[in-house]
Amino acid sequence: MTLTISAASAAELPALLPVLARLRIRVFRDWPYLYDGDLDYEERYLSTFAKSAGAIVVLARDGNEIVGAATGVPLGEHDPAFASPLVAAGYDPGDIFYCAESVLLPDYRGLGAGHAFFDQREAAARAQGCKYSSFCAVIRSPDHPARPPEYRPLDSFWKKRGYTPIANTIVHYTWRDLGGSSETEKPMQVWIKSLVAEIG
């Protein structure tokens, strides 16, 4: 197993969209997202990163196989739904780089890909003069029947990276859970990290 991490070039992305869409659906089926994904939707969503000049898509490869990916984009070039609660909390969307999603196949976890994903996205944020890096994470009930007994939240990992949850700052997204008959709204906690000291 040889894991390499690198950013995809803009020229590479269009051909990679189907691969990345399938990877996202595969990983997000698991707890805590339980996402019953749709390939067409995923490809359309991912195409927004290919069209954004400030976006980055970081790939994790084992040889030639893509086993993980992380996306990031200046918040002003992304979904306004995510910006609204940050504006309400007193932030300027123009100062924020949004670390959208990270997906990694289970066999490759614990090998440093998570840190590498954040390193490259935060570097892209600093290069564009962003003051903050942010993301959101789904909130699930601790007693949810689908929660695996061995599940460990990623809160401690995010906190070690310098991220903190913003109190009372929640964004809502909808998707269909596995086994569900329709899409339902999910609360997502917003986390943020200051990059100001790193920018200087």
Image (cartoon, rainbow, N blue to C red):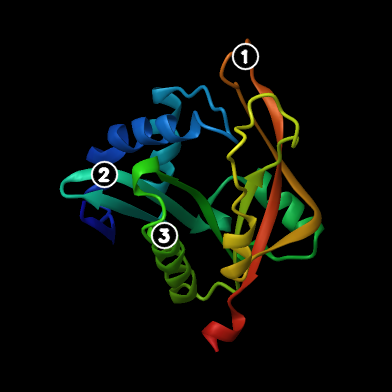
What residue do we see at 34% from left, 48% from top? Answer: 108
Looking at numbered disc 2 in the image, what kind of residue is underneath it? Answer: Ile
Q: Position of residue 44 (x, y in %)?
A: 42, 32
Looking at numbered disc 1 in the image, what kind of residue is underneath it? Answer: Gly
Q: Secondary structure at mark 1?
A: loop
Q: Is residue 95 visible?
A: no
What residue do we see at 74% from left, 37% from top? Answer: 142
Badge 1 crowding class, 10 Å Cα cut-off, few under 14, some 14 to 19, many 20 or more, is few
Q: Position of residue 173 (x, y in %)?
A: 66, 35
Q: Nearer the viewer, residue 32 or 19?
A: 32
Marks 1 and 3, how far apart at CA: 31 Å
Marks 2 and 1, how far apart at CA: 29 Å
Q: Which mark is residue 180?
A: 1
Q: Position of residue 180 (x, y in %)?
A: 62, 14
Q: Answer above or below: position of 135 versus 125.
A: above
Q: Quick one: label 2 or label 1, which is nearer the N terminus?
A: 2
Looking at numbered disc 3 in the image, what kind of residue is underneath it? Answer: Phe
Marks 2 and 3, how far apart at CA: 14 Å
Side (left or right) of 113 relative to 191? left
Q: Which mark is residue 66?
A: 2
